[in-house]
Image: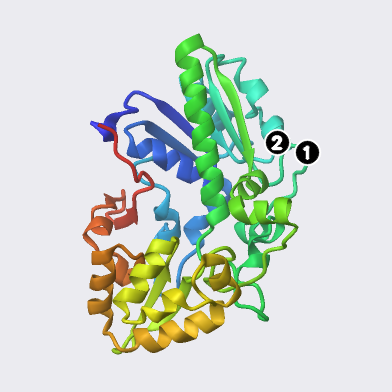
């Protein structure tokens, strides 16, 4: 079974907050034994205390903490204490993977860096996550990386302050990079029997994810500007419209055929031949005029009927759902993982594994 794919694999998580623990949870979801070491001298992972005003103040965990800590064995240790450090080192002797987000200098002082640990386990895969790389020990949370890597500058409405993405997306992107590196290291170990040092930084992971926005600059010398939900290269894409029942929808029309089908569905076939809109480059140039025309047509439909029509002809469009509405979807419900903690608390979070293998 897929959820037992990594059964027998032993992962030691020397990581806190989001990115490192997300890596650990990936392996726990797929059957690995994941042992999370939390600093007992500071009350454990800092995110245990990151609670919403509506959360139980007496609970020893937050919803945030629960989001990436599922089916892990939790040990509270102080690696500055010899007995605790010895106990953790004994676990690492038989481990397959260590995930660490210590500052490199801190890891070295505690003997928890790769060079130290490989002397007791030469087949170990050591996965290290930093903020800016090994040469810069400056700490950073996700919002700083969204700013440093260009995301914050691009996000938000024109002529207004930048807006951060509402999940710590850079952490999650870094977690994916680290997981990919670990999987390659496991393949190498299977072939050669050798361990590996895998490293990524939040900054590099963020820059690697700039995709077309980076290329728009590198090839076109165009600095991406804040456009709300719109797309710099495509129109109508990301445009939000209200239907007759005053409910919002979003369009994502990426091809000429889709635009023609959209016009037919909305009973505005004349827009297909309008010399302001008949090809994508012109629609991008005249996106405001296009949005005005589409808004007048869309308001004649109620949302469900219109979305059903667009789905039938193959035009990408969607509801703008809140979190309650998202988890009314059957696919989303199937991705909920539940766990009862040692204190009897019943917890829920969403899977980090969103693929299947057969």
- Residue 25 visible to the viewer: yes
SS at mark 2 in the image: helix
Side of 225 relative to 347 (left or right): right
Q: Residue at x 27, y 77 (%)?
A: 306
Q: Residue at x 62, y 50 (%)?
A: 206
Residue 44 appears in view: no
**Furthest-top residue in this view:** 192
Q: How many marks?
A: 2
Q: Position of residue 303 (x, y in %)?
A: 28, 80
| Residue 52 circle label | none
Which is closer to the viewer, label 1 or label 2? 1
In space, the residues marked 1 and 2 are separated at their CA atoms by 9 Å
- Please give the residue where the numbered disc 1 appears in the rendered image: 135
Compare residues 182 and 76 and report the one nearer the observer: 182
Q: Element type at marker 1?
A: loop
Kindly identify which numbered label has been placed on residue 104: 2
């Amino acid at each position: 079974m897929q959820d037992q794919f990594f059964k027998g694999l032993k992962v030691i998580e020397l990581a806190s907050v989001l990115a490192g623990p997300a890596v650990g949870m990936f392996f726990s979801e797929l059957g690995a034994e994941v042992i999370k070491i939390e600093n007992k001298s500071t009350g454990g992972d800092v995110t245990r205390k990151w609670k919403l005003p509506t959360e139980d103040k007496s609970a020893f965990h937050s919803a945030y903490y629960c989001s990436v800590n599922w089916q892990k064995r939790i040990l509270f240790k102080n690696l500055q204490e010899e007995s605790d450090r010895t106990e953790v080192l004994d676990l690492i002797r038989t481990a397959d993977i260590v995930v660490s987000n210590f500052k490199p200098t801190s890891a070295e002082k505690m003997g928890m860096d790769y060079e130290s640990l490989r002397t007791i386990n030469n087949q170990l895969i050591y996965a290290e996550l930093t903020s800016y790389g090994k040469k810069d020990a400056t700490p950073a949370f996700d919002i700083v990386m969204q700013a440093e890597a260009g995301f914050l500058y691009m996000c938000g409405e024109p002529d207004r302050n930048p807006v951060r993405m509402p999940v710590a997306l850079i952490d999650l992107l870094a977690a994916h990079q680290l997981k990919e590196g670990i999987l390659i290291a496991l393949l190498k170990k299977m072939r050669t029997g050798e361990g590996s040092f895998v490293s990524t930084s939040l900054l590099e992971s963020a820059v690697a994810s700039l995709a077309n926005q980076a290329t728009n600059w590198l090839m076109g010398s165009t600095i991406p500007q804040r456009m709300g939900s719109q797309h710099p290269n495509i129109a109508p894409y990301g445009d939000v419209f209200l239907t007759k029942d005053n409910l919002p929808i979003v369009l994502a029309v990426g091809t000429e055929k889709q635009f023609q089908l959209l016009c037919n569905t909305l009973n505005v076939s004349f827009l297909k031949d309008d010399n302001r809109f008949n090809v994508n480059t012109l629609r991008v140039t005249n996106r405001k005029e296009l949005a005005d025309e589409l808004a007048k047509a869309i308001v004649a439909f109620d949302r469900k009927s219109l979305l059903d029509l667009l789905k039938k002809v193959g035009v990408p469009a969607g509801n703008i759902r809140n979190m309650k509405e998202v988890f009314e979807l059957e696919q989303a419900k199937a991705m909920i993982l539940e766990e009862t903690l040692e204190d009897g608390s019943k917890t829920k979070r969403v899977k980090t594994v969103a693929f299947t293998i057969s």
